[in-house]
Amino acid sequence: MSQNIKVTYVYHSCFVLEVDNNTLLFDPPGKGFLPKGAWNKIEKTVEGKELYVFISHGHADHYTPLIFELEPKKAYYVLSEDVISKDKGMNLSDGEDVKIGSVRVRTLKSNDEGLAYLIHLKGNTIYFGGDLAKWDWPEWCERKRRKHVEVFERTLEYLKKLKVDMAFSNMDKRLKSWAGPVDFINAVKPRFFVPIHTFGNEEWIDDLIKADIPKETSVFNYRKPWDSVVWNV
């Protein structure tokens, strides 16, 4: 049975995903990283919903303790080990496979901090990469650069064996590789791809749209905070 999934861009790596009565909130950052009024909008969006909050790691551009003050109908907090749960969430390490509410979650170790998540919801598989990306900063030594790239490449080898319906993964044009979105799409071939970690440089996505990627993959070409797209899956 087909269903609609609504994806809303908030800022940087923060997105809201809505399907039926389930609402997923990914990596809401601290207020210093959010556009004015964004937190109030997040509060209103999740109010009265069955909410799943996913925090990939505790960096301030991916996490705020204000998540524990939200007032949904019911809340599940899925957190990496470095985030203090305040007895309200489930701290996970890499390689775990758990059922949380209506979703099943498998964790993958990041090559930066924390985790990436594979989320099974309503028959769909959703990947959220957090800070797992093709980090190949030119100022790094070859050994460090190679180590990070190898983790990214192993992750793609794993994901390409699965049927990934929707993927959230990094795009950073400060890097020659753009942090790997083209590699990701060509290897994994998700039906839908959402670039994350843009630090508000939404115009970067124009170049990804023009890149050599499969036409079968739709890219969320958001232009500003609170842009949304509805995909039928």
Image: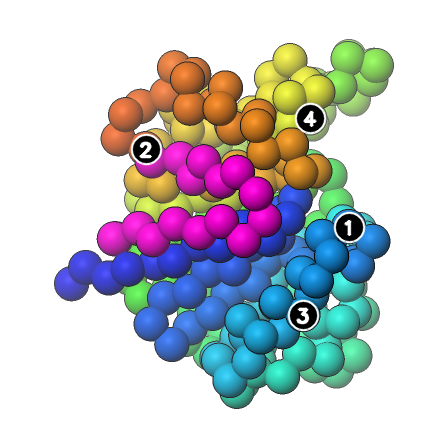
Does the CB distance between marks 3 and 1 fall below 8 Å?
no
Q: How is the image coloured?
A: rainbow
Cα separation, mark 3 vs mark 1, equals: 14 Å
Q: Which residue is mark 1?
A: 33
Task: Measuring from the top left, give residue 18's x and y in whole percent.
Answer: 42, 65
Q: Which residue is mark 3?
A: 40
Q: Quadrant of the N terminus?
A: bottom left
Label 4 residue SS? loop
Q: Is 98 on the left-hand or right-hand side of 191?
A: right
Q: Which residue is mark 4?
A: 135
Q: Label 2 neighbourhood size at 10 Å, few (<14), some (14-19), many (20+)?
A: some
User: To which quarter of the image does residue 40 belong?
Assistant: bottom right
What residue lies at 84% left-to-right and 14% top-to-bottom? 139
Kindly report which numbered mark, 1 or 2, lies closer to the viewer in this rendering: 1
Three-letter code for the amino acid on which mark 3 is drawn: Asn
Cα separation, mark 1 vs mark 2, equals: 30 Å
Task: Measuring from the top left, give residue 186's x and y in whole percent.
Answer: 39, 24
Q: Is 5 on the left-hand or right-hand side of 175?
A: left
Q: Which residues are magenta?
A: 218-233
Q: Does label 1 or label 2 sit earlier along the sequence?
A: 1
Q: Label 4 neighbourhood size at 10 Å, few (<14), some (14-19), many (20+)?
A: many
Determine if residue 210 is in view: yes
